[in-house]
Image: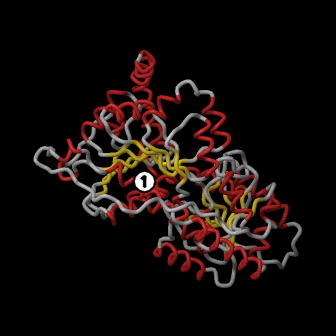
């Protein structure tokens, strides 16, 4: 308990700094950081009509997208069940809003910082029946408060890379407290599950990756196809979710390649979509400095006179992938750990990743074996392979087909996750006998469906 007291004091002392940081982030990154600051310190108003929600925490964009098929399944199977969806970043919140703003039983909030009093106040106001943490969000006081208030906690779509495993081992002394609080861990892969078990975790089940169950938004697919038509017969190559310094690295390699092609060669339109939209000004300045003809998505449609189209919009990645014939996935050309390539595959846009994919190493390794993902050692090799995809209809079709098979072989995580989550949502006898301020708590029927067995992807040709 003394350790928790010290930990709480640190959060207490940090509060003025946290408030200042949120305001600075609102000015430099995204105005959403200045919204609902009180919620981050536990002050939240929850309507009585949404009594006893299931709390789903998705810290940012990737986790929110992963949560979408699970929330959709909850809403289909249990249409009276309220959902509390929390985030830490404005982009995560916007992603959730784009999917659920029209559903009155899905309500969003900012997640509280990890001080006991702030978490306890948040829990007292919202009274969740279960807490579903997406991927790997293990905050000590979140776990402690939920455990002490008899809220079952599940780590959903959990992943633990080799790099994260080594980091967690430094905290081996404190991990038993986390494992004791968690009711279950739904791991993405057998390797993830084994790493959790090596750290002492119990009740670990392999359910697969929820991101395989995502389907492209039809409206965004239609938007991407409309952009494609503006280019006529010119191809587009997207650099997706690029991180700081990667645009320069890729442009250097691109310019070296251009020197090797004849002057009459028609280069594809480069579509650069930074991972963080607040960096678009800096990327635009770099393009101007290098004398590219470029325009922003927010200011102009793509047209044949452009060298580069800068994607400064949020929530339209599926459209960018749809318009392009190949994608270089950012975060993997410098040591940022990579980004999720599944959205590109689902849109029929073969992804090319660089050497730095430590956040997605298992996924990339499996995708390479299935020829759904191409990994290259450096930007120049990546660009060369992307150009092959642009100019060889046969190679492009092969990768698209292998990508579709790869997705199909790994689907089903939502059903498996629902099968193990449903019992956590069933209220206890004490809850059934009580009413919350006149509102009878929602009661779920028992599930009769056991978890589906894990699927093994079919053998595939070796990576090119």
Examine the image and state in which quarter residue 8 appears.
Answer: top left
Side of 353 where 262 appears, left or right? right
Of all residues, the one furthest to the left in this rendering is 438
Of all residues, the one furthest to the top in this rendering is 2
Side of 70 where 245 appears, left or right? right
Q: Residue at x 26, y 42 (%)?
A: 127
Which of the two residues, 458 or 302, is positioned nearer the viewer here?
Answer: 458
Q: Residue at x 46, y 75 (%)?
A: 219
Q: Is residue 59 above or below residue 4?
A: below
Q: Is residue 326 above or below residue 335?
A: below
Examine the image and state in which quarter residue 81 appears.
Answer: bottom left
**Which quarter shows the N terminus?**
top left
Q: Is residue 27 above or below residue 369?
A: above
Sort mark 1 into few (<14), some (14-19) or many (20+) by Cα contacts within 10 Å: many
Q: Is residue 218 above or below residue 312?
A: below
Q: Residue at x 55, y 57 (%)?
A: 208
Which of the two residues, 291 or 164, is positioned nearer the viewer here?
Answer: 164
**Which quarter shows the C terminus?**
bottom right
Q: Position of residue 436 (x, y in %)?
A: 15, 44
Examine the image and state in which quarter residue 78 appears.
Answer: bottom left
Q: Position of residue 169 (x, y in %)?
A: 63, 31
Which of the two residues, 124 or 278, is positioned nearer the viewer here?
Answer: 124
Residue 260 visible in the snapshot: yes
Residue 19 visible in the snapshot: no
Residue position marked by numbered label 1 in the rendering: 420
Q: Position of residue 224 (x, y in %)?
A: 55, 75
Side of 330 where 142 appears, left or right? left
Side of 86 where 125 appears, left or right? left
């Amino acid at each position: 308990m003394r350790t928790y007291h010290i930990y709480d004091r640190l959060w207490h002392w940090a509060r003025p700094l946290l408030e200042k940081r949120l305001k600075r982030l609102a000015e430099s990154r995204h105005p959403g950081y200045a919204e609902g600051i009180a919620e981050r310190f536990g002050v939240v108003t929850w309507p009585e009509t949404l009594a006893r929600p299931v709390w789903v925490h998705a810290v940012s964009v990737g986790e929110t997208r992963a949560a979408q098929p699970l929330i959709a399944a909850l809403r289909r199977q249990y249409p009276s069940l309220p959902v509390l969806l929390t985030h830490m970043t404005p982009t995560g919140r916007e992603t959730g809003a784009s999917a659920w703003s029209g559903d009155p039983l899905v309500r969003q909030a900012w997640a509280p910082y990890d001080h006991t009093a702030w978490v306890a106040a948040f829990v007292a106001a919202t009274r969740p029946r279960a807490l579903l943490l997406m991927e790997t969000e293990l905050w000590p006081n979140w776990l402690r408060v939920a455990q002490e208030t008899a809220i079952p906690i599940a780590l959903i779509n959990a992943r633990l890379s080799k790099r994260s495993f080594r980091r967690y081992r430094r905290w081996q002394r404190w991990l038993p407290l986390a494992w004791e609080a968690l009711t279950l861990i739904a791991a993405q892969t057998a390797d993830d599950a084994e790493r959790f078990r090596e750290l002492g975790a119990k009740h670990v089940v392999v359910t697969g990756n929820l991101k395989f169950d995502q389907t492209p938004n039809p409206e965004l697919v239609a938007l991407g196809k409309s952009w494609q038509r503006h280019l006529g017969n010119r191809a587009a190559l997207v650099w997706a979710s690029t991180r700081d310094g990667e645009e320069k690295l890729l442009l250097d390699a691109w310019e070296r390649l251009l020197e090797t092609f004849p002057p009459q060669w028609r280069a594809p339109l480069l579509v650069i979509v930074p991972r963080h939209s607040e960096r678009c000004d800096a990327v635009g300045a770099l393009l101007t400095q290098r004398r590219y003809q470029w325009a922003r998505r927010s200011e102009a449609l793509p047209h044949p006179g452009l060298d580069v189209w800068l994607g400064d919009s949020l929530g339209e990645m599926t459209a960018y992938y749809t318009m392009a014939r190949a994608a270089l996935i950012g975060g993997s050309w410098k040591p940022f750990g990579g980004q999720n390539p599944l959205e590109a595959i689902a849109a029929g846009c073969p992804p090319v990743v660089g050497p730095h994919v430590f956040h997605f190493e298992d996924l990339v390794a499996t995708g390479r074996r299935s020829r759904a993902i191409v990994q290259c050692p450096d930007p120049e090799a990546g660009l060369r392979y992307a150009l092959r995809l642009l100019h060889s209809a046969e190679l492009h079709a092969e990768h698209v087909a292998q990508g579709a098979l790869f997705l199909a072989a790994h689907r089903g995580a939502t059903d498996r996750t629902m099968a193990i989550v449903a019992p956590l949502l069933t209220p206890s006898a004490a809850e059934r006998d009580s009413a919350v301020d006149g509102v009878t708590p929602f009661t779920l029927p028992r599930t009769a469906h056991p978890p589906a067995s894990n699927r093994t992807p079919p053998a595939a040709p070796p990576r090119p």
